[in-house]
Amino acid sequence: MPTYKAKAIVLNTFKLGEADKIVVMFSGSKGKIRAVAKGIRKTKSKFGGTLEPFSVVDLLLYEGKSLDIIQQAEIIMSFKEIRADLEKYKYGSVMLELIDKVAQEREESYEVFSLVLAALQCLKEADADYQTLLTVFQLKLMAELGYRPHLARCPACGGEVPAANEQALFSFRFGGLICDSCRDKDADAVDVSAATRAQIEQALETPLARWKELDFKVENVRGIARLTELFVAYHLDRKLKSPRFLDM
């Protein structure tokens, strides 16, 4: 079997048989990788604790027909701080599940990989306001995937949307703010305040590493988070399981 190397983020693991695990990972060079770690559940496994969710690892793998086989794994960054903090773990789990849903196997995605790595680093270093960080990450990820919200022109007809200081309608179907003439084209469009519009634009334009500089109004954070969650769910055509943990 041919071998290959990859740098990847561990997204999830599943038990396989009595001693093995299936490890789901995301790599910039290979996209989503599903591989077997043989004997990982044995006491003296050579993998030790290297293949835990959130860990960034250097891998040597055998390429298989359906599942690859992990031959070697070495930790680059463990992000143990996220696993050890329940609140950080909750928000980090949403990030990982989202990547698991959008990543394609055998497909390069260096930009998305860098974005996830930056988000995990921000989460590791953060001491509060995890919801804002998650929302900014989700917006940037959707933009990277080709679903950047349209805020300047109506995506349904190309017409002008209400002025920046006015309330407008946001359409999940069309992917952004729609003009008054198109409001009847999407009965599910929702009202968005001028403040929310401005903060979404700030989130998209500000580098993720500088997310703490965003002037997110406390009273608007939950509204923007909900809007973003619905936007993500619509374009993924499914709801994520992990956001439920945020209310626990």
Image (cartoon, rainbow, N blue to C red):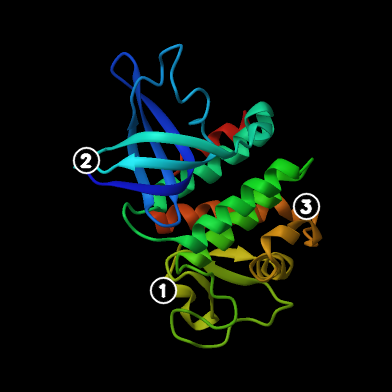
- Kindly give the residue lying farthest to the left in the view shown: 65
Mark 1: amino acid: Lys
* Relative side of 176 to 71, left or right: right
Note whether residue 176 is visible: yes
Note whether residue 131 is visible: no
121 and 227: which is toward the camera: 121
Q: Which residue is mark 1?
A: 185
Residue 66 image label: 2
Which residue is rendered at x = 67% and y = 69% of the image? 197
Q: Secondary structure at mark 3?
A: helix
**Whole-percent x and y of residue 227?**
58, 56
Give the Cα distance between marks 2 and 3: 48 Å
Which residue is rendered at x = 80% and y = 61% of the image? 213
Mark 3: amino acid: Glu
Mark 3 nearby-residue class (10 Å; few <14, some 14–19, many ≥20): few
Q: Are marks 1 and 2 in contact (CB under 8 Å)?
A: no
Mark 2 nearby-residue class (10 Å; few <14, some 14–19, many ≥20): few
Q: Earlier in the sequence, mark 2 or mark 3?
A: 2
Q: Which residue is mark 3?
A: 219
The answer to which image quadrant residue 65 occupies is: top left
- Residue 66, compared with residue 199, is above or below; it is above
Mark 1 nearby-residue class (10 Å; few <14, some 14–19, many ≥20): few
**Whole-percent x and y of residue 93?**
55, 38
Which residue is rendered at x = 62% and y = 33% of the image? 89
